[in-house]
Amino acid sequence: MCCHVIYVIRTAGRGRTGARGPSGDTSTTVFSRPKQKLGEKEIEEHSFSGMATAASWKPLLLRALDSNAHLKHSTFFQLATIGSNGRPSNRTVVFRGFQEDTNEIQINTDRRSAKIEEIKHCHFGEICWYFTESWEQFRINGKIDIIDGANSDACKLQHREKAWFASSLKSRLQYLAPAPRLPDISNGSGEENQLDPSEGPVEAFCLLLFDPEQVDYLNLKSNERFIFTSRSSEQGFKVWMSEKVNP
Ligand SMILES: Cc1cc2nc3c(=O)[nH]c(=O)nc-3n(C[C@H](O)[C@H](O)[C@H](O)COP(=O)(O)O)c2cc1C
């Protein structure tokens, strides 16, 4: 297993009594070197073993999902993209979990929907996710990968198929409906579509993989805000840094 380095930047000075930092990644920290001074900031280096992206915002997000699990809407978030006209475009989508052991967030969508053209035009997006029980907001900025049936990567097609079978039959049926946003000419007849549960993904089904690059975390209960930023290391894996900032 390879070993990766994450730099955790904390502003110098004492924290408030009782103030808690992000519950973070202590479980994956296997080694820590002495702190170095960098102007007003202290840098701690932690070595991590595990996947290429040890991101300390992820345990916070998992904790928020857990503490808000009794609320159905806690798995809905807003996904913003940029239209080809340069205007923002935003909509609610369902969190479909992380892509295996990575930080990539899975979203199911219809290949015929407007967001696909928008993402093709500009593959950056932002997720805004508010947890109403724990009063935590995550603004996750990153890149979006579109995986539709025409994708040439066999591994990605497998992920798409897995996502298809992981969704309910009712959800799958939506992808057989007439193309979104075209005029409704059904006259309310509500034609019933049939789908064999063992049938693989239909053409309209599309998996989006959202790869976070920056996370802005705000906790309204503790009045704390952390910015997590990533960069690619020379070895080609992602290094995450975090900074506590004023809310
Ligand atoms: C609670 C809720 C959950 C939704 N989940 C999804 C989803 O997972 N994927 C999706 O493509 N659209 C979902 N939608 C519909 C989108 O908000 C949006 O209307 C649709 O995707 C078309 O957006 P677009 O025209 O910007 O592509 C959901 C809507 C609501 C209200």
Image (cartoon, rainbow, N blue to C red):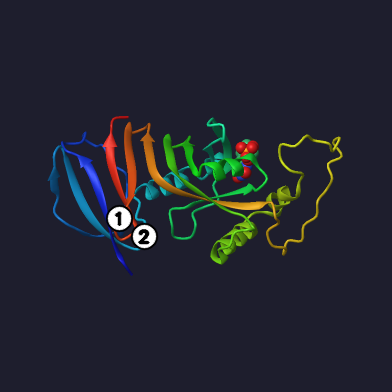
Query: Which percent across, then down, holds residue 7?
Result: 25, 50
Residue in the foreground of this view, choosing between 155 and 26: 155
Task: Name above or below for residue 173 compared with residue 17.
Answer: below
Q: Is residue 215 left or right of residue 68?
A: left
Which amino acid type is marked by label 2?
Answer: Ala
Mark seen at residue 52: 2
Q: Nearer the viewer, mark 1 or mark 2?
A: 1
Mark seen at residue 233: 1
Q: Is residue 228 left or right of residue 181?
A: left
Beta carbon at label 1 within 8 Å of ligand 1 = no
Does residue 72 appear in this view? no
Residue in the foreground of this view, choosing between 47 and 135: 47
Query: Which percent across, then down, holds residue 22?
Result: 31, 44
- Quick one: label 1 or label 2, which is nearer the N terminus? 2
| Among the 4 quarters of the image, the one containing residue 135 | top left
Which amino acid type is marked by label 1?
Answer: Ser
For numbered disc 1, what is the local secondary structure? loop
What is the total number of numbered labels drawn onto the structure image?
A: 2
> What residue is shown at x 62% (from left), y 61% (from top)?
161
> What residue is shown at x 71% (from left), y 40% (from top)?
180
For numbered disc 2, what is the local secondary structure? loop
Beta carbon at label 2 within 8 Å of ligand 1 = no
> What residue is shown at x 64% (from left), y 54% (from top)?
167
Instruction: Assign the N terminus to one quadrant of the image.
Output: bottom left
